[in-house]
Image (tube, helix red, strand yellow):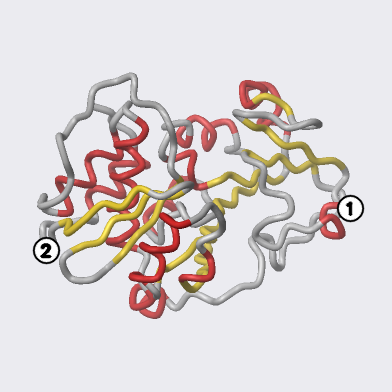
Amino acid sequence: MIHSPYYDILLNGIDDGAAVRRIVHGVSWTAAELEDGRVGVAMHTTGETAPRLLDTLEGLPARRAAEASLSWNFEEASEGMAVVNAWYNTAENAVRLGVTPPEGALDGIALDGLRVGFVGHLPGHSGITDELLARAASWFILEREPRPGDLPDSACEYLLPDCDLVVITGSAAVNKTMPRLLELAKNARVVLTGPTVTLCPGLLELGIDRLFGLAITEGEEMLRGIVEKRGSVNRFGRRFCLERK
């Protein structure tokens, strides 16, 4: 079993107050619905060479089902992270925490003169525009499946320690690279972005400066939509931005 502060914080905040009603596998996303109606989503991550920890998450208490996020079977881990996000990523939790509805992941952050590293192909998404990036001294993209111009994700070991700002896709929590990425970026300002990011204040204690994610508000529509086609899930919810004080 994996022991990491990142996952410990997430799991310790979940109890058995609700069970998992269903897991839905979409084209690009995996979703979980709890019995109380809460719905969460996580990036679908392929990789089933390792055995599952649990035969199925459906019917299990949320706390037990969320432990699947620790699995080395990444499809199961996607399910587990969707359960985690069903628990935390709600409009009610956003209101309770007093989070703001931002336009973009880097709103209010001056990039002038900064060396910026992106873990995941994030430019063009989350309000990260070419105009914004033009203000940075330099920037690069680390990708597990690189496109032209991207760097392989293994370059993180060499490049992230020298960055001023590091922006990480929330799906790094599914493939278990998140703890190491945070360690490498400990001297930088760190932003987690994307629908897989969890609205959990305890994560900010790990040196994360901003959580920019999505609280699902249109659960039924989202559960149908992710099965029908590939695409963004942002239209099914409300974005949130939680910052370290």
Q: Name the element at disc 1.
A: loop
Q: Is residue 11 left or right of residue 40?
A: left
Q: Name the element at disc 2.
A: loop
- Classify 157 as above or below 161: above
State the CA–CA distance, disc 1 to disc 2: 47 Å
**Count of marks placed on residues:** 2
The amino acid at mark 2 is Gly
Q: Is residue 142 left or right of residue 24?
A: right
Q: Which residue is found at the position 16% from the left and 34% from the top? A: 54
Q: Is residue 237 left or right of residue 85?
A: right
Q: Which residue is found at the position 28% from the left and 28% from the top? A: 2
Q: Nearer the viewer, residue 40 or 5?
A: 40
Which of the 4 image quadrants contains residue 40? bottom left
Measuring from the top left, give residue 201's x and y in whole percent.
39, 60
Which of the 4 image quadrants contains residue 164? top right
Q: Which mark is residue 96?
A: none
The amino acid at mark 1 is Ala
Q: Is residue 67 left or right of residue 211?
A: left
Q: Residues within 10 Å of mark 1 (few under 14, many from 20)?
A: few
Measuring from the top left, give residue 186's x and y in whole percent.
57, 38
Q: Which mark is residue 17?
A: 2
Q: Residue furthest front?
A: 228
Q: Which residue is mark 1?
A: 134
Q: Which residue is found at the position 26% from the left and 52% from the top? A: 23
- Classify 244 as above or below 3: below
Q: Quadrant of the N terminus?
A: top left
Q: Nearer the viewer, residue 228 or 149?
A: 228
1 or 2: tag closer to the N-terminus: 2
- Classify 231 as above or below 180: below
